[in-house]
Amino acid sequence: MAKYLFHGSYSIEGNKGIVKGGGGTARRKAIAALFEGMGGKLECIYWALGRDDYFIIADLPNNVSAAALALHVGGSGAIGRLASVPLLTAEDVDAATKLTVNYTPPGQ
């Protein structure tokens, strides 16, 4: 299973929905159900002050699942901006260091 960071901001309608829909704990429950319904698992969610309103770390089966989630959630009108970031483990980085990459920088 792959791990992802989702972060972004709510639209005005999304913020109204959080207030009307029971606040943070109700939203966390709905978000956990969303990930579980896609074969994944919510690890944590935090709300923040500043450019980003929320940070979510979750497991999903693959990049296709992450893309589907981003498309549907982003297209709902409740989200003003959404970014999805695949996260790598230390072991993933170890494996990457062992791969041979034939790269020539520009001009060399």
Image: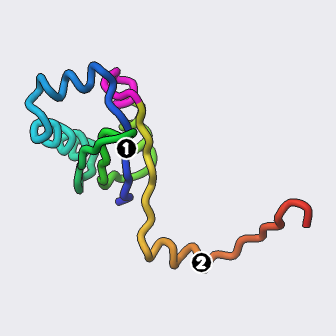
Distance from disc 1 to disc 2, alpha carbons, whole Å, reads: 28 Å
Left or right relative to 30: residue 57: right
Horizontal side of residue 16 vs 64, given as left or right: left
Give the answer, above or below, for where 39 lies relative to 103. Answer: above
Residue numbers of the magenta segment: 73-80
Say if 30 sits above or below 87 in the image: above
Quadrant in the rendering for residue 102: bottom right
Residue at the right extreme, as displayed: 107
Callout 1, which amino acid? Answer: His
- Residue 103 as seen in the image, left or right of residue 11: right
Disc 2 marks which amino acid?
Thr
Q: Residue 76 magenta-drawn?
A: yes
Residue 29, given in percent of the width and then of the height, sits at 13, 41
Which type of secondary structure does the marked residue at label 2 adopt? helix
Quadrant of the drawing holding the C terminus: bottom right
Q: Which residue is mark 1?
A: 7
Quarter occupied by the N terminus = bottom left
Q: Is residue 97 above or below residue 33?
A: below
- State which tag comes first along the sequence, 1 or 2: 1
Q: Residue at image x 30%, y 21%?
A: 12
The residue indicated by pointer 2 is 97
At x 19%, y 23%, the residue is 17
